[in-house]
Image: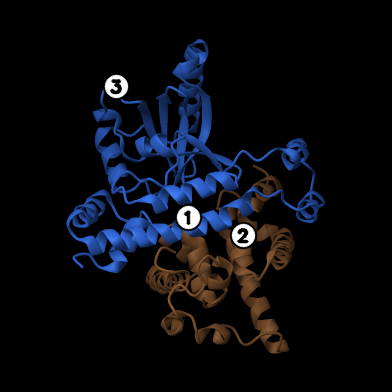
Chain colours: A blue, B brown
Amino acid sequence: MTIDRATIAAYVDRELDDIAARRVERAAETDPQVASAILRYRALTATLAAHYGPVAEEAVPDRLLDLIEGAGPVDTSLAARRKAKRTRFGIPQWGAIAAALLLGLTIGLRPWLPAEPVTVEGGALVAAGPLSQALDTQLASNQPADAPVRIGLSFRDRLGRYCRSFESVAVDGIGCRTKGRWRLERTVPGAATADYRQAGSGSLAAAAADMMVGDALDANAERAARDGGWRR
Amino acid sequence: MRFEDELVGLLPRLRRFARGLARDAGDADDLCQAAIERALKSKRQWSAGTRLDSWMYRITRNLWIDERRAAARRGVQKPVDEAVLQIAGDGASQVEAGALRGDVDGAMARLPAEQREVVMLILVEGYAYREAAEILEVPVGTVTSRLARGREALIHLLGEAA
C-alpha cells in the first residue's frame, strides 16, 4: 500500500491538512488497497454513528435534569427545552447517512456531511455540508463572484477562537471554530428572505465588531489561519 | 452562559458517550448521574470560559474507570481489561472475522477500556486527536495507537464492511 494505515485513518478522521489529504486522495485513485482502507474506516465510523447517534436524540431522563435544576436558579428556557422536540438527526437520518457511506467511495466529496447548511449538535447550531466546507476552505480575498456562500470578515473573538461572518441563500451569520466545527453564534435569514436582509447584514456587522478582539484578519492572516486548520 | 444551562445542553452528548462506555442504558444514565453530581459538587474547580464539555467528559470517564476498578475488586467482573484481552486488541484475530456482525454493543464491550473510550471520543463524539488526548490526559501518540488498535479490532469483529 502506498500510504500507511495511520495516515489513512488520519485522513478519514479529518486530521490531515489539505496538502496531505490531497496526497491520500490521489493515492486512492490508483491504489485499490488505499481506496478500500478508506472505505472500511468510513464504514466503521458510519456504523458507530448510526448506532450511537440516536442516543443523543432521546429525551433526557427527568432524574438527570432534576439534579441540575435543583442545583441553582432555573433558566426559564429550561422547561421549554425539556419538552422541545429534538430537531437533530433522528434514527432514519442516521440510517440514511450510514447507507450513503456504505454505498460507495466518493473521494473528496465528503459524503458523510449532510447537505443541509446547518445542523444541531450538543444543543448548539453548527454549520454543516456546503456551509461548513465554505467556512473551512473559502478565502474572502479569493472567492468566486457566484460562490453560494460569501465569506465576509474573519477575526478572533475573546475566547481566541477564529470566527467568520458569511452570507448565503438560506442563512447569514457568524460561525466560530469550536471543537473542530463552526458553531453559529449569530444567524439571520439569508437572501431567500430579502426583506430581512438589509437589517440582518447591519446587525451582523455590529455583532462582528462587538465580538472581535483586535482587527479583522487581512488576506495573508486569513490564508495562514485556514492553512493552520483554524486552530487557536 | 450559566454553568447549569451549559450542562443541560451537554447532556444528550454525555449520555451518548456514557452509552458507549457502560454495559447498558441504565448503567449509562447512572454514570451520567454520578458525573453530574460530581460536577455540581466541584463546580468551583471549573473556570468559566474554559471548555465545560472536556471537563465533563473527563469526569465521566474517570468515574467509569473508578467504577470498573471497584467492581473488579468486588469480584463482580474480571479485572479491568483482563476479561476482554482474550478476544480483543491483539487477540481479536483469534475470533472469526465478522463474528459479531451487526452487534456494535457486543463488539465495543470486547474492546479494552482504553480503546473503547478513544473510539467513542474520536469516532462517535467527533473530537480531534489532540482534544481527546487532553480529555484523557495522555499524549496524542497514545491516543492514535489506541485508536488504531480499537478500530482494527472493531472492523475485524463486525466484519469487513463493519
Say which element carries label 3: loop
- Dot 3 and dot 2 within a common chain: no
Along the polypeptide, which appears first: circle 2 or circle 1? 2
Q: Position of residue A203 (x, y in %)?
A: 51, 20
Q: Is residue A33 left or right of residue B66?
A: left
- The residue where tag 1 is placed is B126
In this picture, is A39 found above or below A86?
below
- The residue where tag 3 is placed is A146
State which mark lies toward you, 2 or 1: 1
Q: Say which mark, if any, is on residue B27.
A: none
Pointer 3 indicates a residue of which chain? A
- Amino acid at circle 2: Met
Q: Position of residue A216 (x, y in %)?
A: 36, 32
- Amino acid at circle 3: Asp
| Mark 3 surroundings: few (<14), some (14-19) or many (≥20) residues within 10 A | few
Q: Is residue B65 left or right of residue A175?
A: right
